[in-house]
C-alpha cells in the first residue's frame, strides 16, 4: 500500500449523502475492501461541517482522510460545504471527492473552482455505482499518499 497509514489503521472516510440508498450502496461497496475503511455518514451540509470541526456530538469523531461529498444536500448544499472546507486552514488539505448525480457543466466547473480534488457523476446502475466506489477506493486509499491530520 502506498498510503501513509499503517496496515492496522483504517482509512477514515466521511460520506456526506442525504440519500439513504446511495449511502447504503457506498457502504456495501466498501465492505469487500482489502483496505480497512471506517465509513462515517452525515446527511446534510450542516452536519458535515459540525463533523469536520468536531463540534457538539462530533467532538470525538476521527479526522477524515477523505470526504465523499454530494452536491445536492439539505440545509447547506455541497458547494457551500466544499467552499468552507477549502477555505478553512485546518480542513483544506482533506481531499474532497464530489460524488453527485449532477452532470451540469456549471456544477463541474464550480466544484473545481472551489478546489474539489475530483468530480464523479454517480451512475444509476448498481453494478456501475459499485465499480465507481471501488475505483475511488483503489485510487484514493491504495495509490494516493493522503496528507497527515
Image (spheres, rainbow, N blue to C red):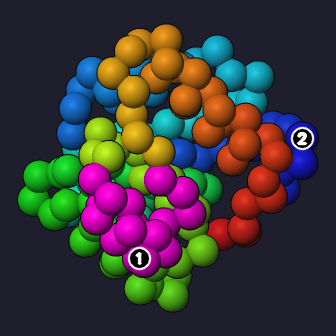
Q: Is residue 6 visible?
A: no
Residue at image x 25%, y 71%?
80
What residue range appears in magenta? 104-119
Please tell me which residue lies in front, 136 or 146: 136
- Residue with the mark numbered 1: 114
Relative to 66, say whether 141 is above or below: above
Q: Position of residue 140 (x, y in %)?
A: 69, 47
Splitting the image into 4 quarters, where does residue 30 fall?
top right
Residue at the farthest left position: 75
The residue furthest front is 105
SS type, badge 2: loop
State the residue position of label 2. Answer: 1
Q: How many marks?
A: 2
Query: Magenta span has 111?
Result: yes
User: Horizontally, is 69 left or right of 4 in the view?
Assistant: left
Of the two numbered discs 2 and 1 on the same chain, state the one appearing first in sequence: 2
Amino acid at each position: 500500500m502506498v498510503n501513509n497509514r499503517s496496515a492496522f489503521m483504517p482509512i477514515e472516510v466521511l460520506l456526506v449523502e442525504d440519500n439513504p440508498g446511495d449511502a447504503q450502496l457506498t457502504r456495501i461497496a466498501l465492505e469487500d475492501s482489502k483496505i480497512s475503511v471506517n465509513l462515517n455518514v452525515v446527511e446534510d451540509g450542516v452536519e458535515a461541517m459540525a463533523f469536520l470541526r468536531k463540534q457538539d456530538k462530533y467532538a470525538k469523531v476521527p479526522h477524515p482522510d477523505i470526504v465523499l461529498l454530494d452536491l445536492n444536500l439539505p440545509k447547506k448544499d455541497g458547494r457551500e460545504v466544499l467552499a468552507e472546507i477549502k477555505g478553512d486552514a485546518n480542513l483544506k488539505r482533506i481531499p474532497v471527492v464530489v460524488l453527485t448525480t449532477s452532470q451540469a457543466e456549471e456544477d463541474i466547473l464550480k466544484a473545481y473552482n472551489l478546489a474539489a480534488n475530483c468530480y464523479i457523476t454517480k451512475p444509476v446502475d448498481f453494478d456501475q455505482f459499485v465499480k465507481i466506489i471501488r475505483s475511488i477506493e483503489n485510487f484514493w486509499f491504495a495509490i494516493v499518499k493522503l496528507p497527515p491530520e
